[in-house]
Amino acid sequence: MNLQDLGVDSSLTIPQNTETMLAAGGIILLSIIIVSIIIFKTKWHASMLPLFIGLLAYGVVFVAVQIITGFITVVPSVDIAVENNTQMLVVLQTLLLAAGMVLARYAALKIVTTKHKQHGDIMMVGAGIGLGDGLMYGLTAISDYVMCTAFRVDGLEGVINGMAEADYKSMALLFDQLTRSPSFLWLLMGLSVLVVYLSQIILIEPAYGVVKKELEPYWNVVTFVGYALVTMAFKLYDYKSVVQIEISFFVLLVFAVGLFYYVRKGTFGKIEYETKVENGDLSVGKNLKKHIK
């Protein structure tokens, strides 16, 4: 297999602002994650333990999804279909991950709520699960940043020289994406993961309501569909098309706003949380009402 077979032009160069946009997306994402955790910790008196439990739950589900996907894609005829249509693999992984997130939220909340039942603690579980999405993006962004530098210094042919065929193909396709996509795409990718992170925090509330039996089990379906739509919205586009990129990001924002509105409308005032009062005892309050004092 050569570069011509892959449709990759090694003479192309990476747009000048690509590394800047990659870094900007990552910095914005990291900043919001840190700020949100600080707010949950200081203003809502959350413990840090729920954050790590949420992150652990995400990690277990992520690894399980990778294993399941690996088994599915080696099934005869399925492997050929996936190789010829990478978007099918994206959809498959997203649906499996969305289903796994339902289980991750349930398991993490069951563990956390044995000792931590304040609103901030529950939000911290969502932040921990969302942090998993952020870390996966961060590792990819760092790798892409490093490869940008390598491609600029050695060129595509210098980088792929001597590589195995599988690595050769993936590296050539990465080069094609870096050279043919508009540089602002890499900023939007960071912002899209930020939207997913915030969605994880939003979705933890109905998940907690189901665990406490204060909401109907159908909210698990809402969290599954909501996460799947938000995660998938900015993945099914042609990276060479500016119009498709802009439309996909707009659709992502529409899904996220709609999800936030639906969850707020359906859960506000229906879920009880424990909250500390001045003497240090615990009392029970509904949703966010205790925070609007």
Image (cartoon, rainbow, N blue to C red):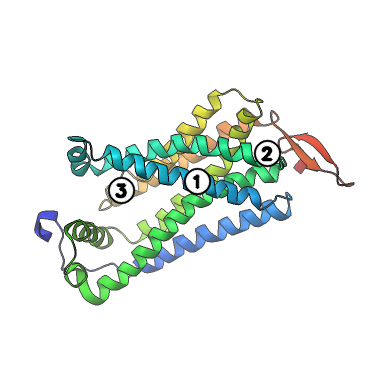
Q: Is residue 165 left or right of residue 23?
A: left
- Which residue is at the front of the view, 1 or 175? 1
Residue at point 71% right, 35% down?
A: 287
Count of all numbered marks drawn on residues in the image? 3
Kindly state the secondary structure of the residue where label 3 is placed.
Answer: helix
- Residue 217, quarter of picture: top right
Please name the amino acid that badge 1 sits on: Tyr
Residue at point 66% right, 57% down?
A: 38
Q: Is residue 24 left or right of residue 202?
A: left
Q: Quadrant of the C terminus?
A: top right
Disc 3 vs disc 2: which is toward the camera? 2
Give the residue pinned by disc 3.
243
Give the residue pinned by disc 1.
58
- Decide which of tag 1 and tag 2 comes sooner along the chain: 1
- Which residue is at the front of the view, 193 or 67? 67
- Residue 202, quarter of picture: top right
Q: Is residue 240 left or right of residue 2?
A: right
Please name the amino acid that badge 2 sits on: Thr
Disc 1 vs disc 3: which is toward the camera? 1
Q: Quadrant of the N terminus?
A: bottom left
Give the residue pinned by disc 2.
113
The 10 Å Cα crowd at callout 1, few under 14, some 14 to 19, many 20 or more, is many
Placement of 69 over or under 271, stated as above or below:
below
Kindly state the secondary structure of the residue where label 2 is placed.
Answer: loop
Placement of 286 over or under 62, stated as above or below:
above
Residue 17 visible (yes or no): no
| Image coords of residue 67 (percent x, y) | 35, 43
Please name the amino acid that badge 3 sits on: Val
- Decide which of tag 3 and tag 2 comes sooner along the chain: 2
For the residues labelled 1 and 3, the Cα–Cα distance comes to 33 Å
